[in-house]
Amino acid sequence: MTGRCGGLVWRMGMGPLFCSNMGTFPPPAPLSPIPTAFAEACRVSRTDAELFERCRDVLVNRFGSEKIWFTVTSPRGPDRRIGAAAGYEGARQVAHVGSGDIELTIAADTGVADQIRADALPLAWGLLVTLELRSVLLERQADLDDAVFQLRALRQVARLLSSVHSTEETEHLIVDFTAEVFITSWACLYRPRGKEYHPVAFRSRDEAPPPAGILREQLDRVLALGSSATACDQTPLAAVVTPGTQFVVPLDAGPERMAVLAFGPRVTGQQLGNAELELAGTLSFAAAIALKNAALVEELHSAATTDQLTGLYNRRALEERLRAELQRASRHALHTTIVLIDIDYFKLVNDNLGHLEGDRLLVLLAKIFSTQSRNLDIVGRLGGDEFLVILPMTNGEEAQIYVKRVLDTLRRLPEDYPEFGPQTISLGLAVSPRHGSTPSALLRAADAALYRAKRTGGNRVEVAEGADGSG
């Protein structure tokens, strides 16, 4: 710190500090109580205003006069004078210091001005240094608060995202969580679908309808891949997004844009600060990765449970679903019927038309088996030309209705696909618990019924034999 009294500019580590005194003054008394009282005022004061009041009281008590005034000048607000309401017009300025954009003037009645001059200037310096330190501490505290908030938000979103598995659950979680974090009136998640970003998850505090889609080409032009959270005010983005959108956060995972988050006005009416924009960027990365992972998990699950040719359940998935349905049927005393289907003379199709046409016929028949089923039914391909249909909460007589629909549709196949000619199928039907209460037992019963249908020429349905030998 350098300086000299009498108007020279002082410089301290936290910014420029200047002082001016109104003449020479004697040194303060060696055992002056002012430093101790000043330190106590700094310790107990909660606000700047309280600090000024307490420091003025130190001088008032020290010199026995109420006619002492502190005047604080700052561009952030009007001048603030602390002291008696009357008598200021005749006061003399005894100290004037400044630091940054804050200036402090101490004035006193002429009767005590000379007495307090020696103590006033050091006190004024100390006040401004304290204010500088307080400002730095508050700024650091704000930074710490922002960091704590971000860490808590990240920890919470990580915990929540780890608890969901499907893409749809992840989408709704992202919307709900970010709307709470940024306290917005509404939030919408858009996913790329063809030529537009389509709204897939929406949340509103006032039950407003979801916004319309956004043209993909236009949004990608004004919000390039890798962009950060962007406010819509006075930017080309405002002309592209839904009216009323305040800011947009792209969810990019490397070279791929997974989604876009759009937010309405904040409930607090405040604009996003730098810390919140940084948090939006961090959360956007976590959300994009979560969406990517959810998609990969679903792809892996689909590959493990789906027949690649027909898109139906594969053998593994059928066995799992059959086991689950039989357990549910046992708990609630319900029937479950399975229908084992085999295409008659399918080898001739491959031999005469080729395997590609044989595959095409399998896809067509899979579509018939699937479209004639109910939403709760499970249709899959066991392998080759053999299919399995699981009919929950269905007895043998009710299952015949499904069989009839399939056979009627199959008879009309040559009308649309004459190259395949007439096609027939053989079916084996088994009902739980009559023909078996476990997957293996029920499948053996249905397979035996299917074998009888094939042995007698095919193009027919056979019901498994019961424990008494009846069908």
Image (spheres, helix red, strand yellow):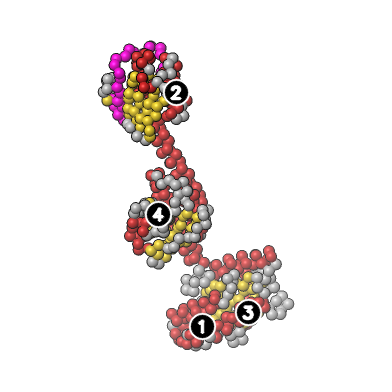
Q: Which residue is mark 2?
A: 54
Could you tell me if the residues under marks 3 and 4 are in contact, i.e. CB atoms within 8 Å? no
Q: How busy is the neighbourhood of tag 3: few (under 14 within 10 Å), some, or many (20 plus)?
A: few
Q: Amino acid at mark 3?
A: Ile
- At x 45%, y 81%, the residue is 357
Task: Answer above or below: position of 351 versus 269.
Answer: below
* Residue 447 in sight from this viewpoint: no
Q: Which residue is mark 3?
A: 401
Q: Amino acid at mark 2?
A: Arg
Task: Answer above or below: position of 174 versus 312.
Answer: above
Task: Answer above or below: position of 356 versus 185.
Answer: below
| Label 1 SS | helix
Could you tell me if the residues under marks 3 and 2 are in contact, i.e. CB atoms within 8 Å? no
The percent position of residue 398, horizontal first and vertical second, equals: 65, 77
Report the mark closest to the observer, 4 or 1: 4
The percent position of residue 463, horizontal first and vertical second, equals: 65, 79
The region drawn magenta spans: 10-35
Q: Earlier in the sequence, mark 3 or mark 4?
A: 4
Foreground residue among 223 and 185: 185
Q: Which residue is mark 4?
A: 248
Q: CA distance from mark 3 to mark 4?
A: 53 Å
Q: Is residue 405 left or right of residue 192?
A: right
- What number is the disc on residue 346? 1
Q: Earlier in the sequence, mark 1 or mark 2?
A: 2
Report the mark closest to the observer, 3 or 4: 4
Whether residue 16 appears in magenta in the rendering, the answer is yes
| Label 2 SS | helix
Based on the displayed image, in which of its 4 quarters is residue 131 positioned? top left
